[in-house]
Amino acid sequence: MISPKKTTDKAALQRPSTGAAARWYAASVFPGKEDVAERHLRLQGFHPFIPRCEKTIRHARRIETRPAAYFPGYMFIALDVALQRWRSVNGTFGVRSLIMQGDRPLPVPSGLVERFIALTGKDGLLDFSGGLTAGASVRILSGPFAEMIGRLDRLDPAGRARVLVAIMNGEIPVDMDSRELVAIA
């Protein structure tokens, strides 16, 4: 059996070779069958993309961290609906169906999947840090602490950050989304 190679090449994912009119579409997959669906779609010549993150699993006094789908039960597929036989996606092992609008697949908003691809690291996992590192000086962009300067205390893989903001002769920890921060030099 031919084993399709998983690719994390961002250039290949952003510009799939399916044609100039290719768009990204969402597909519903069976629970836990994202990898099976991805493998079978690649064998058929499609270009699937599954955003992944690390997930911690606790079972029988063991803690294990493994890659998991960021959107469990869903994946993205690059298609040119005018040229490709897109209906065969619905019959692929692991795939429930494409997300439809009437009798046609519904494309995801332009730039959404491309942004996920840009946030994917070399390990194939989403990285929401945006170049932020613990101990770096950051400026808060929005919220009640907008335009204040702080020091990044920690950043978790889900994109949550803890910033120490200097207020009233002390540092107050503030938890926020890392998208609300920008590193300053």
Image (tube, rainbow, N blue to C red):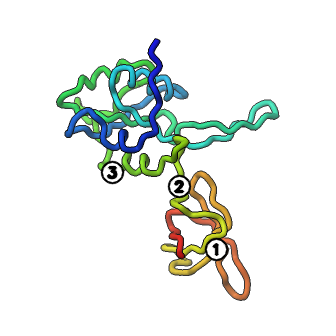
Residue at 46%, 27% in the rendered image: 5
Residue 119 point in image, percent of width and height: 47, 51
Q: Residue 151 carries which label?
A: 1
Front residue of this view, candidates 27 and 178 = 178
The residue to which callout 2 is attached is 128
Q: Do the residues labelled 1 and 3 touch (CB within 8 Å)?
A: no
In the rendered structure, which amino acid carries the disc numbered 3? Gly
Instruction: Calculate the distance from the C-alpha at mark 2 to the C-alpha at mark 3.
Output: 16 Å
The residue type indicated by label 2 comes to: Phe
Q: Which residue is drawn at 42% across and 40% down?
A: 9
Q: Do the residues labelled 2 and 3 touch (CB within 8 Å)?
A: no
Residue lying furthest left: 82
92 lies above or below 167: above
- The image position of residue 136, as x and y in percent, is 62, 70
Residue at image point 80% right, 30% down: 60
**What's the CA distance linking mark 1 and mark 3?**
31 Å
Secondary element under disc 2, as helix, strand or loop, is loop
- Name the residue that disc number 3 marks: 111
Front-most of residues 114 and 101: 114
